[in-house]
Image (cartoon, grey):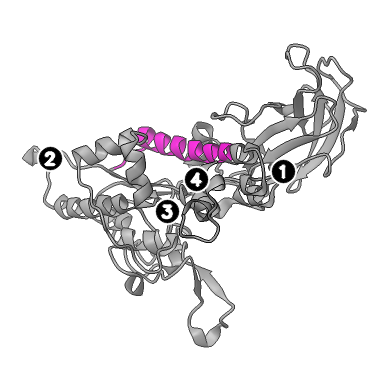
């Protein structure tokens, strides 16, 4: 279900767009700027509870200084793609063409019931979205991330919506650029052994050990060392390189428990890529045994960002890091981070998963901040996939009227 506040923001924006044709700087009026955030899957009761606890102070200030509505009914089905499409267009699914996250391909006479198309794609949209309405009236629109943006072709000159625009929107897209999946590596995948054939070995209080692994088609060597300057005893550092050379490290990772920050992540690590912009990933060493016998190394899904203005992508990646997209929910659910709380775990798996969520949110926030501060805009659209992802994982354990509810699990 979409958060109610989201719809009110868009309705207020529609009223503003209606005024743009009549507003002139000669009248002493300043054109309105608007930021539209799609906050995916926020449950109204939960938001109210967080507001009462004082945990959403920025949202509280927005509500106090603007408009807020309760008991707003979403579209059916209440899924991400049709919900957002209705917000962007002001039209229901039967008009805008987006009736689900995945939809049967048409015309029906040419496809089977097993063939589908994504409701997230722009090519399925049949009604004009707000960023095109704004651009048609001369407003500069920047879309950091949104549903129904990719592919860009319908919005470009000659496309379904792209003719007659006064200004050209600037689009960014990350989900379409993800390749493969995220994963974890342990000694079961690549067993540590004594390091051989390395040049420029860094200092280590214990003889270095090595691992080899691949992310996509890119092969890496990993060097486990006992950093003499680290107070931890035993192996505590992983150096990642494409060649066996300690001076050509792609990342230097410390084994640290999950935290409330993103200080222990690698910078974007470039991967072999035939296209531009390049693929990249982020690495996190959650655990390394002191004797070097085992470890837990996570890497995000290899990804590249797309934009209608390719020249902006290097600056975007420098400011925000490589696109992450989602947290490691599948790996968490599979037990790759250790036993989950419902499986009898001690909370370590949840803390590791939440750190991947934080990395995701940080990338979205920094990308949005960069766009706000760097690009000229009147309308700016951005997105967060939370709490929807976490709701899918945990809501069944938290609602007393659902069969998966157990008080001791819900409390933890």
Q: Which numbered dot is residue 310? A: 4
Of residues 307 and 9, the one nearer the viewer is 9
Q: Which residue lies furthest to the bottom in this view?
A: 109
Label 3: how many residues lie within 10 Å, few (<14), some (14-19) or many (20+)?
many
Q: Which numbered dot is residue 184? A: 1
Q: Which of marks 3 and 4 is in front?
A: 3
User: Label 2's element?
Assistant: helix
User: Label 3's element?
Assistant: loop
Q: Specify start and end residues of the magenta stretch as a single range.
A: 354-377
Residue at label 2?
25
* Mark 1–mark 3 distance (CA, rounded to whole Å): 27 Å
Q: Which of marks 1 and 4 is in front?
A: 1
Could you tell which of marks 1 and 2 lies nearer the N-terminus? 2
Residue that appears at 38% across and 33% down: 374
Q: Do the residues labelled 1 and 3 touch (CB within 8 Å)?
A: no
Residue 351 % position (x, y): 59, 36
Residue that appears at 67% across and 45% down: 344
* Mark 1–mark 4 distance (CA, rounded to whole Å): 32 Å
Of residues 260 and 225, the one nearer the viewer is 260
* Mark 3–mark 4 distance (CA, rounded to whole Å): 31 Å
Q: Which numbered dot is residue 41? A: 3
Query: Vertical placement of 376 versus 42: above or below?
Result: above
Q: Are marks 4 and 2 in contact (CB under 8 Å)?
A: no
Q: Is the magenta stretch mostly helix, strand or loop?
A: helix
Residue 304 % position (x, y): 58, 46
User: Label 4's element?
Assistant: helix
* Mark 4–mark 2 distance (CA, rounded to whole Å): 32 Å
Quarter-of-image position of residue 368: top left
């Amino acid at each position: 279900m979409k958060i109610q506040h989201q719809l009110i923001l868009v309705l207020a924006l529609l009223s503003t767009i209606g005024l743009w044709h009549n507003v002139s700087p000669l009248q002493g009026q300043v054109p309105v700027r608007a930021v539209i955030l799609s906050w995916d899957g926020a449950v109204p009761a939960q938001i109210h509870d967080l507001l009462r606890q004082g945990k959403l102070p920025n949202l509280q200030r927005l509500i106090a200084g603007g408009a807020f509505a309760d008991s707003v009914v979403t579209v059916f089905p209440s899924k991400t793609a049709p919900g957002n499409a209705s917000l962007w267009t002001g039209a229901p699914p039967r008009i805008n063409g987006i009736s689900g996250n995945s939809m049967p391909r048409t015309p029906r006479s040419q496809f089977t019931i097993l063939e589908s198309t994504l409701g997230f794609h722009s090519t399925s949209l049949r009604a004009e979205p707000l960023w095109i309405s704004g651009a048609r009236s001369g407003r500069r629109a920047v879309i950091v991330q949104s549903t129904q943006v990719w592919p860009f072709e319908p919005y470009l000159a000659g496309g379904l919506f792209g003719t007659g625009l006064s200004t050209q929107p600037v689009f960014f897209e990350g989900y379409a650029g993800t390749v493969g999946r995220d994963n974890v590596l342990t000694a079961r995948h690549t067993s540590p052994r004594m390091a051989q054939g390395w040049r420029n070995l860094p200092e280590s209080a214990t003889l270095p050990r090595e691992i080899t692994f691949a992310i996509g088609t890119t092969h890496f060597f990993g060097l486990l060392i006992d950093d003499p300057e680290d107070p931890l005893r035993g192996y505590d550092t992983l150096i990642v390189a494409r060649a066996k050379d300690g001076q050509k490290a792609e990342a230097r990772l410390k084994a640290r428990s999950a935290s409330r920050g993103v200080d222990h992540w690698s910078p974007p690590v470039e991967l072999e890529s035939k296209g531009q912009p390049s693929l990249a990933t982020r690495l996190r060493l959650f655990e390394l045994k002191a004797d070097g016998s085992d470890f837990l190394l996570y890497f995000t899904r290899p990804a590249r960002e797309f934009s209608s203005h390719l020249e902006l992508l290097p600056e975007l990646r420098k400011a925000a890091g490589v696109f992450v997209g989602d947290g490691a929910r599948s790996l968490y659910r599979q037990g790759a981070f250790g036993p989950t709380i419902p499986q009898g775990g001690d909370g370590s798996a949840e803390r590791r998963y939440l750190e991947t969520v934080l990395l995701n949110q940080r990338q979205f926030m920094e990308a949005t901040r960069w766009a706000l501060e760097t690009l000229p805009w009147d309308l700016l659209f951005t997105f967060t996939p939370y709490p929807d992802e976490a709701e899918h994982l945990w809501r069944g354990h938290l609602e007393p009227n659902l069969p998966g509810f157990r008080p001791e699990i819900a409390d933890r």
